[in-house]
Amino acid sequence: MKLFVFLFLPFLCYAQQHSSYDGTTGVIYSPNYPGDYPNSADYIYTITVPTGNFIHLTFFDFLTEDSYDYMTVENYTLSGDQTGFAIDIQASQATLTFKSDLTTTYRGFAIQYDQVPVGSVFMPSDQCSNWSLTSTYGIVTSPNYPENYPDNMSCGVTIEVENGHLISLQFLAFQTEDSYDIVTVYDADNNDDSKVLGTFSGKAVPQTLTSTGNTMRIQFSSDLVKNFSGFSALYTSFVSNDFKRGVLPQTYTTDSILKRENQKLLDWLKKKAGSNTVINTIGSN
């Protein structure tokens, strides 16, 4: 019976979804973010800003099934891991299209758009201050990301979620001056040296970290010379009794049992159904 059902999957159709955005700035998330987007997704996102402005896009997070689930914007087709990509749309309106195939889904994307006056250049925020986040999930970046962070700075963010919840922190991209520009994560709402979860620098992406309570602090400092793109990280809040410590919430993986049992068959069907399809890589025209 399963074989019969799966053989007919390529013929299923899903309604196209459309979302519109305006305002000086905002963030576009993939469906279900930070959970996995659905199979057979077909989404169109339209951004409109006042005449006399253009649109700048920053991809704080982008992870899809490489070559099969993709976004098109302007002359670019993006697929796989494209976290840190940025582009100027030289118009007051931009259209982003996202499509996924029948199998294998990932976290998707968090894309910030900004309105920029024509004749000027977009400048990412280099603000280095201490601030707090209280939402159930969010993106934390170094100042200026994905451009280089400033020299000689020290700032941090405190995350506080609902009582009874824990915090999972996953670094999406990471590059600092090794041994000199440091990210320190604390299992507390302050810089308590007795509660350090990890200290990181260099190019290796740190492992996922999990708090023991409902607070976490991320502290970043740089020295006087050499700077890099820094980091982008995703934090999520979850109930401690439901998930394993140190691992992202398992409910953020859709129909995982089904995918494991039928992956070989589904991959074969995918190749048969898409044998004549070519997906451009980033930057292709």
Image (cartoon, helix red, strand yellow):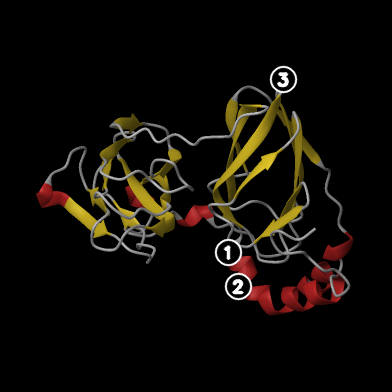
> For the image shown, how many numbered marks are present on the structure?
3
Per the model, the C-alpha gap separating discs 2 and 3 is 48 Å
Q: Nearer the viewer, residue 277 or 247?
A: 277
Among numbered discs 2 and 3, the one appearing first in the sequence: 3
Q: Give residue 106's quadrant in the image.
A: bottom right
Circle 1: element type: helix
Does any portion of residue 107 appear in the rendered image? no
Front tag of 2 and 3: 3
Left/right placement of residue 170 relative to residue 57 reads: left
Among numbered discs 1 and 3, the one appearing first in the sequence: 3
- Please report the residue visible at 86 percent of the width from the left and 71 percent of the height from the top: 273
Check disc 3 and give the amino acid type. Answer: Pro
Per the model, the C-alpha gap separating discs 1 and 3 is 43 Å
Quadrant (top left, top right, bottom left, bottom right) of the C terminus: bottom right
Mark 1–mark 2 CB contact (< 8 Å): yes
Q: Which residue is mark 1?
A: 256
- Please report the residue visible at 39 percent of the width from the left and 40 percent of the height from the top: 143
The location of residue 259, given as percent across then percent down, is: 64, 68
- Please report the residue visible at 33 percent of the width from the left and 63 percent of the height from the top: 202
Circle 3: element type: loop
Q: Which residue is mark 2?
A: 260
Which numbered circle lies on residue 50? Answer: 3
The location of residue 100, given as percent across then percent down, is: 73, 56
Above or below — where is 24 with respect to 238? Answer: above
